[in-house]
Amino acid sequence: MSESVLTPDAVKLGLKAASKQDAIKQCADVLVAIGAAGPEYLDGMYAREEQISTYMGEGFAIPHGTNESRAHIHKASLAFLQFPDGVDWNGHQVVVCIPIASNSDEHIGILSSLAGVLSDPDSAEKLRSATSVDEVLALLAPEDAS
């Protein structure tokens, strides 16, 4: 995963959210703060969640906007928000939200890379319990072993 897609300032650990909507708002706020999207993108994220849940399993959700909300995206980016106490996500417990801002099909590659990391139970657990930004970045952007 490219360093430019997930930057250290987009990793937030030890957060609390009162609800799924609150968690999504915090996700949008980080995307806005890092210059990835305009504040209007939040409405698209809420709309996407109404269409289909962004819960992925293993305590992870990937909030993102609708196709129509892509107009409010400035650059492809991910963020990483950890909620150690969990957030109820339509009956599922979410500990990590990885919001996506992407205004083209580049998010397909982002999702594929993310799915690879999350398919490893050890990596997924390490992300859920990470205590440092460097740890998160190392897990989501592993060095090529070859």
Image (cartoon, rainbow, N blue to C red):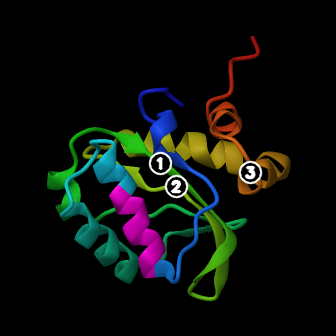
Residue 64 makes an appearance in the image: no
Q: Mark 3 is on which residue type?
A: Ser
Instruction: Find the residue positioned furthest to the top.
Output: 146
Q: Earlier in the sequence, mark 3 or mark 2?
A: 2
3D distance between C-alphas at marks 2 and 1: 5 Å
| Residue 26 place in picture, x, y as percent | 42, 65
* Magenta part, dominant SS: helix
Count numbered badges in the picture. Answer: 3
Q: Are marks 2 and 1 in contact (CB under 8 Å)?
A: yes
The disc at residue 89 is none
3D distance between C-alphas at marks 1 and 3: 19 Å
What SS does tag 3 mark? Answer: loop
Question: Which residue is label 3 attached to?
Answer: 119
Which segment is the magenta one?
A: 21-29
| Residue 47 place in picture, x, y as percent | 29, 77
Give left or right: position of 98 versus 131.
left
Question: Which residue is label 1 attached to?
Answer: 79
Q: Nearer the viewer, residue 39 or 98?
A: 39
What SS does tag 2 mark? Answer: loop
Residue occupying the point 31% across, 48% down? 33
- Is 90 part of what is drawn in magenta? no
Q: Quadrant of residue 134?
A: top right
Q: Mark 1 is on which residue type?
A: Ala
Q: Are marks 3 and 2 in contact (CB under 8 Å)?
A: no
Q: Is residue 84 above or below residue 126?
A: below
Give left or right: position of 139 versus 89.
right
Residue occupying the point 70% across, 51% down? 118
